[in-house]
Image: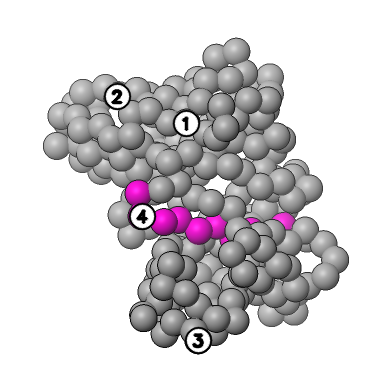
Amino acid sequence: GAGVSQSPSNKVTEKGKDVELRCDPISGHTALYWYRQSLGQGLEFLIYFQGNSAPDKSGLPSDRFSAERTGGSVSTLTIQRTQQEDSAVYLCASSPRLAGSAGTEAFFGQGTRLTVV
Amino acid sequence: AQSVAQPEDQVNVAEGNPLTVKCTYSVSGNPYLFWYVQYPNRGLQFLLKYITGDNLVKGSYGFEAEFNKSQTSFHLKKPSALVSDSALYFCAVSITGRRALTFGSGTRLQVQP
């Protein structure tokens, strides 16, 4: 597609339920990132995938969070047993190679607004 | 570790006046610096970046930024603000070989007519 696509755009879930957020990166981009943007906060790095390398999961806030990337393309971020503090906008981004490497910028999707009630 | 600071939560400016959104960084190597803009209910849009070379970088929508190594700053500027520039602005930094971009907390720019 022309840009990074995320679905759903909005998700309301009950506390304790599991949710899956999807990201379709720009075709051909080898790097994919997940960030979290809480109200009034900056962007918090969660995880990134680069080609066939093992993902960097160092930003995941707890073991309730996981992500996978199938076939080097679509990625799913899963949050188990959601808590109210998980409410945020989850942003996905992709880049032709590691963003920041040699000044490569990342291209962002419009995000998924998650509300845990 | 790499970090970015945006000291102002909000900047207010009148339309037609010059604007500056401040950013300072801390890295252990040579930085790559970026500015992104976020309009309401939208994702982040890339504005400009500094890699190397000329300290004054020009980007989209008439924005520019000046890299100052001695002050470790990368302030975003525009000579004449428009109401449509009102948005949330993020500064980001990375260095060679590091994982992902590290973002500042964001600065909300309000341009009054």
Q: Do labels 3 and 4 share a chain?
A: yes
Question: Which quadrant of the view contains residue B1?
Answer: bottom right
Q: What element carries label 1?
A: strand
Q: Nearer the viewer, mark 3 or mark 2?
A: 3
Q: Which amino acid does label 1 sit on?
A: Ser
Q: Name the residue under label 4.
A: B40
Q: What stretch is highlighted in magenta?
A: B31-41
Q: Which amino acid does label 2 sit on?
A: Val
Rendered position, B74 above or below B16: above
What residue appears at the point 36 percent right and 55 percent down from the top-left corner?
B40
Rendered position, A22 above or below B105: above
Measured Cα–Cα span from mark 1 to mark 4: 17 Å
Mark 3–mark 2 CB contact (< 8 Å): no
Whether residue B41 is visible: yes
Q: Is mark 4 on a helix, strand or loop?
A: loop
Measured Cα–Cα span from mark 3 to mark 1: 36 Å
Number of numbered discs visible in the structure rendering:
4
Q: Quadrant of the C terminus of chain B?
A: bottom left
Q: Which of B6 and A65 is in front in this view?
A: B6
What residue appears at the point 53 percent right and 68 percent down from the top-left corner?
B5
Q: Are marks 1 and 4 on the same chain?
A: no
Q: Which of marks 3 and 4 is in front?
A: 3
Q: Residue A19 carries which label?
A: 2
Q: Are marks 4 and 2 on the same chain?
A: no
Mark 1–mark 4 CB contact (< 8 Å): no
Question: Which quadrant of the view contains residue A88?
Answer: top left
